[in-house]
Amino acid sequence: MYSVLIIDDEELIGDGVKAKLERAGLPVVGKINVAYGGLQGLKAAEEIKPHIIITDMRMPEVDGIQLIRQLSQQLPLTKFIMLSGHDDYSYVREAFKYGVLDYLLKPASSAELAGQVQAAIAAIEADSRQALALERNQQDKQTLLAARLNLLLNAAAEKDERLLQPPSLVTDTHDLPDMLESWHMLECFFVHPSFAVGLFSMGEAAFSTRELARTDACLNQSIRASGYTAQLQTLAFHDTQGKVYAVFNLAETLPLDAFNALLRETIEQLSLDSSDKPVVSVSKIGGLKDLPQLYRQAQLAMSYRILREPDTVLYLNEPPKRQEEWLPARKDIDELRQSVETLQLERIHLWIDRWLPDSLVERISLEQLEAVFDLLMTGIHRHFNSRLIFEENEQAQAFASFHTLHDLRQYLKGYVYTAKQLVSESTNLEGVVIGDAISYVRQHFYREIQLAEVANRVSMNYSYFSKLFKERMGLTFTAYLTKIRMEEAQKLLKDPALRIHEISEKVGYSNPYHFSRAFKNHCGISPKEFRNTMQ
């Protein structure tokens, strides 16, 4: 429903216009308000924010021209209709400069008023459709630009240096149409000379549309609130890994302190509805041609997050220099190895606390920190081989996910505890595993069956299962399978109605010759000779 505000300094005329509109019975018109005089009209318009304003031109204190001039800025979507006398044409011409839709000569009839209101509604709906089309066009443009941006940001992996240059710097272009078009789109979209790239981390899954939309909305909200809309452009997008990035296009007049404050405000807004602590890592400032390098700088800055917490805006500062004297000595490594081999949790925990304290943040390099992490993890993997439930690729993924040294210490202690629990339960677990394996073999010996199938069935590493099976059963898996098959074959050979080739198939041999050879190797006589002894 559309709302209408009538403004006239004469109550009788204002109420009369309202009555005429009501008699017209326009179904799409809702509440009709009347304000008496320009000052009351300004106040009412600010409160009601009507879709349509019908105003008299000549009024004391604030006339129609002044009212329209002020309200057209405050209510850009509102349509204005003038009520004018025969001698008001100079006012009419002036009013059209401020976007007045049309005017009516007093006294306007009910039909005339209805016609003008319907025309105003049609104009409002046309504006709405146009705005929606423009918004969709802008969204489509940004979506296409984001896709093109990924092509450029990952161009560093190519050996052709032309991929890293904007069109104005490339001379040989016959085989690079897509790349050049991408650069051209960027040059047209961004208007400022300076660029930075930010990587946002909020803990959600890759390619999260919610995370991308929230980042874009909070960035734009912070820019509008700070008053820097003319000095900063942004483009939020997913990279090929599904992470949320933003390209910042900065005017030379934008203070870096203001840029930093804007980023912190954005992170604060993102944290309001996030269970994880949002963080943004920011590259150095560069030009358009530096975007691929700035993209990698943002990634590098994020990798130092564990050494920069609790800060939420991480810049690519000079990393701490490597301190050789800090690295664990041989005796310290031997101490860890002995503790791991005996799974002495208290000694391992003390070692972790001694070599990964919070005080390391200011004096350790990321490479040193990862080396200590790998030292402990590799020691556990090496000692327990494949008996642990952790996969090797989890190791690298885990390190990249830690946000604080406290998180890292807790993970390592939990990892060691889990390892000890696994070892403590291994005896019973291995007995159950072998029991399940034997049961599976006895149920499926009549068909082709391999060690890998059974190991997978009991969820155990192939090599370790093979070793464990022989330790527990005193036979290799193949020897045990043959034993079960031969025992069953001996039972079946007692039935004279069954032919030997039939028995061969029933115990898992499609070739009777292979069955006979296996039977003789196991029993010392052929199947036929065994049957004769039964007679």
Image: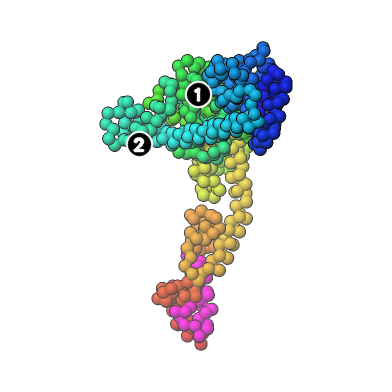
CA gap, disc 1 to disc 2?
Answer: 32 Å
Residue 172 at least partly seen: yes
For image coordinates 55% across by 48% down, the residue present is 388
Label 2 packing within 10 angstroms: few (<14), some (14-19), many (20+): few
Horizontal and vertical percent for residue 288?
A: 40, 25
Q: Does residue 158 lie above or below 65 as drawn?
A: below
- Residue 457: which quarter of the image? bottom right
Provide the secondary structure element on which disc 2 rests: helix
For the residue pair 17 and 377, the one nearer the viewer reads as 17
For image coordinates 33% across by 28% down, the residue present is 167
Judged by its main secondary structure, the magenta piece is: helix
Q: Is residue 15 left or right of residue 271?
A: right
Label 1 packing within 10 angstroms: few (<14), some (14-19), many (20+): many
For image coordinates 43% across by 21% down, the residue present is 192
Where is the N terminus found, in terms of image quarters? top right
Q: Which residue is mark 2?
A: 178
Q: Is residue 167 left or right of residue 101?
A: left
